[in-house]
Amino acid sequence: MTKIEWCDETINPLGHWCFGPGGTKENPKPCVYCYAKKMAMRGMNGCEKCRSFNVPHTHFEQLDKLTAWKNPKNIFVCSMADLFGDWVPNNWIEQVFKACREAPQHRYLFLTKNPSRYKKISGILPCGNNFWYGSTVTNNQMPFYFSKKENVFLSIEPIQGDFDPTYFNTVKWAIIGTETGNRKDKIIPKREWLENIVKGCSLMGIPVFMKDSLAQIWGEPLIQEYPW
């Protein structure tokens, strides 16, 4: 099980590491609100490479879980890394896809801060109802890759401004949340921002999933819809 509300399980075949949007091994650019780095540095899985959060490595043994889990699950793939970072070799990505194809009973949810990689490798992206490709965005100036043949969703977290309703006209699902923790400069979203996202998605028939972190701003009950 996982504490991430919108999935049933997570796997991390790349281990725990990320160089951040636009970053490289030589010049990492980690997100200031990265939850994964904080968790990795606590040594949560006992791997020293994971704990450093800056050493490219794999834990492909994680992929064995996919066939071991017989009942269908919604699985967030690489919750502690970015499978589509420019630093990830194509053959690593293909190995993950191969394992997913061999366990078609599950639904696979991928999420990246580097959506341009989707376009670069569009020829090898598996399609179908059990493959979903997400982009993390924080404001409506951020581009994301989309294609009519793929199931595309947005993870809007942390929300850092208002969104024009037309921003959502090419996606199939929107997950929204606010930054947690005690960082001094974090932005607390306004309720009207949430209302505009919900309104824009509703007009286009797009399900919305509000993370529990929004409860104090939105109130109860939270909107927690799925596109399947």
Image: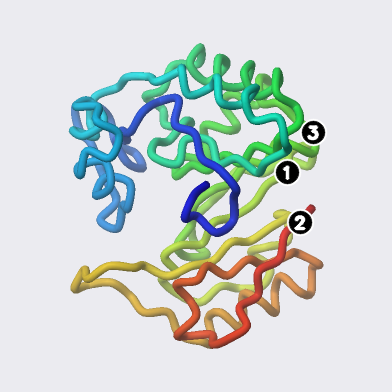
Element under disc 2: loop
Mark 1 — residue?
151
The amino acid type, in three-letter code, at marker 1 is: Asn
Q: Where does residue 177 sit, x and y in percent of width and height? A: 48, 67
Mark 3 — residue?
128
Label 2 Cα neighbours within 10 Å, binned few <14 / some 14-19 / many ≥20:
few
Q: Which mark is residue 227?
A: 2
Q: Nearer the viewer, mark 1 or mark 2?
A: 2
Question: Residue visible at 79% across and 37% down?
Answer: 149
The amino acid type, in three-letter code, at marker 3 is: Gly
Q: How many marks?
A: 3
Labels 1 and 2: the sequence-earlier one = 1
Question: Residue visible at 66% across and 26% down?
Answer: 125
Q: Where does residue 158 sit, x and y in percent of width and height? A: 41, 65
Mark 3 and mark 2 in contact (Cβ < 8 Å)? no
Labels 2 and 3: the sequence-earlier one = 3
Q: Where does residue 210 sit, x and y in percent of width and height? A: 58, 70
Element under disc 1: strand
Label 1 Cα neighbours within 10 Å, binned few <14 / some 14-19 / many ≥20:
many
Q: How far apart in space, not on screen, are marks 1 and 2 (Cα)?
A: 10 Å
Q: Nearer the viewer, residue 62 or 76?
A: 62
Q: Nearer the viewer, residue 152 or 208?
A: 208
Question: Residue visible at 54% across and 87% down?
Answer: 219
Q: How far apart in space, not on screen, are marks 2 and 3 (Cα)?
A: 14 Å
Label 3 Cα neighbours within 10 Å, binned few <14 / some 14-19 / many ≥20:
few
Coloration of the structure image: rainbow
Corner quadrant of residue 173:
bottom right
Mark 2 and mark 1 in contact (Cβ < 8 Å)? yes
Q: Where does residue 63 sit, x and y in percent of width and height? A: 53, 22
Question: Residue visible at 52% across and 37% down?
Answer: 116
Q: Nearer the viewer, residue 203 or 47?
A: 47
Relative to 98, residue 37 above or below: below
